[in-house]
Amino acid sequence: MSAEQTGAFFALVSVCSGLGSVLSLLLLLAKPVRERLFGLSAIREGQRCMLRADMLAAYYKHREEKTIRQYEYENFLYEYKAYKALHGNSFIERIAREVAEWEIVT
């Protein structure tokens, strides 16, 4: 390999590593920019709020009897899973543990 080829090879390696660094930076910045541009964080917060309100409505509706219909319990579990995926708080965890101990009526 001649000195000219070696120099060209090192230049190519430098360009490729630079492009890799730039692409990595763009990937890291893409999510926050996309969330701010499209308002995704506000949408997530709204979804969390709606899920929390629906789970609390089911909880307060049945907390005296401590029984819940099967379809309501299944809906509660789906909502809880979605709520946790949206990084919901631990308050609903306590509610979900309590609901899990209730009698399920078919």
Image: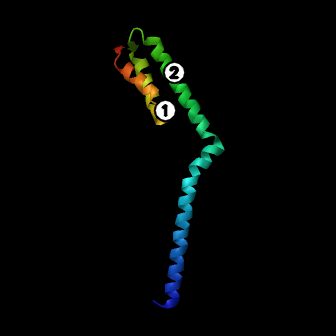
15 left or right of 63 in image: right
Q: Secondary structure at mark 1?
A: loop
Q: Amino acid at mark 2?
A: Asp
Q: Which residue is mark 2?
A: 54
Residue drawn at x 55%, y 26% is: 50
Q: Report the disc number at residue 80.
A: none
Reply above or below: 39 against 83.
Answer: below
Residue shown at 50% from the left, 90% from the top: 3
State the residue at coordinates (43%, 18%). 72
Q: Which amino acid type corresponds to the residue marked 1 in the rendered image?
A: Gly
Q: Nearer the viewer, mark 2 or mark 1?
A: 1
Q: Residue at x 47, y 12 (%)?
A: 61
* Residue linked to disc 1: 88
Q: Earlier in the sequence, mark 2 or mark 1?
A: 2
Tell me where residue 36 appears, x and y as whole percent: 63, 44
| Residue nearest the observer in this picture, 70 or 50 | 50
Vertical placement of 40 versus 5: above or below?
above
Position of the C terminus, as image quadrant, is: top left
